[in-house]
Amino acid sequence: MQRQEFEKLASGLRPRLLSTAKSILGSVEEADDAVQDTLIKLWFFRDRLSNYDNPAAPAAVILRRVCISAIRSRQSSLDLDEAMTVEFNTYSDTIDPDIMEAIEGLPKMEQAVLKMKHIEGMETEEIASLIGSNPGAVRTALSRARKRVRDIYLKSKA
């Protein structure tokens, strides 16, 4: 699935996902975060979406799991970003293992935007449109991710 197809799919799914997430989580802010997380996961799953008659089905499953994780993290005081991570295994051969370890320690949103920007070569505006966010939020997440990777990497070398 190409980027334009995914953007069209994501824009069609977003209102329904947001409504579902609001009803599960009870908070507009948490629901928006859950939908963004869902769309990021769906983006990494995009090559397999053609296997489904209705791409809304895997999106709903992903959203439900993200919402459940958010509820569990509230209850157990675990940070949702630490509890769930985006896999970088397919890129581990081309990236320094110490840097990969630092990346894997990032919150999942930062992992995802870092991967989209530096591994997939996407522009900030593209990332923002894919996850239903704004370019400023993406730039902030990228900045935080880069700083954390640098700090973790330097600590491992000290």
Image (cartoon, helix red, strand yellow):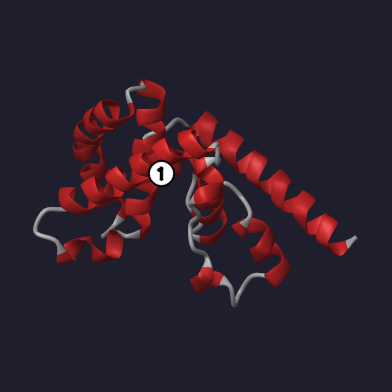
Identify the residue at the far right of this view.
Answer: 158
Query: In the picture provided, is 46 more to the left or to the right than 75?
Result: left
Query: In the picture provided, is 157 more to the left or to the right than 148?
Result: right
Could you say where residue 85 lies in the image, as x and y percent from the top left? 50, 54
Q: Please identify the quadrant where the C terminus is shown.
A: bottom right
Above or below for 14 versus 43: above
Quadrant of the rendered image containing residue 118: bottom right
Amino acid under label 1? Ser
Determine if residue 130 is in view.
Answer: no
Which element carries disc 1, helix, strand or loop?
A: helix
Residue positioned 71% across, 47% down in the render: 148
The residue beneath circle 1 is 69
Q: Residues within 10 Å of mark 1 (few under 14, many from 20)?
A: some
Residue positioned 69% across, 71% down in the render: 97
Residue positioned 68% across, 47% down in the render: 146
Task: Count the marks.
Answer: 1
Residue positioned 55% across, 41% down in the render: 78
Identify the residue at the far bottom of this view.
Answer: 93
Could you say where residue 92 lies in the image, as x and y percent from the top left? 58, 72
Query: In the picture provided, is 115 more to the left or to the right than 25?
Result: right
Front in this rendered view, residue 88 or 129:
88
Identify the residue at the far left of this view.
Answer: 53
Quadrant of the rendered image containing residue 156: bottom right
Could you say where residue 37 lies in the image, as x and y percent from the top left? 40, 43
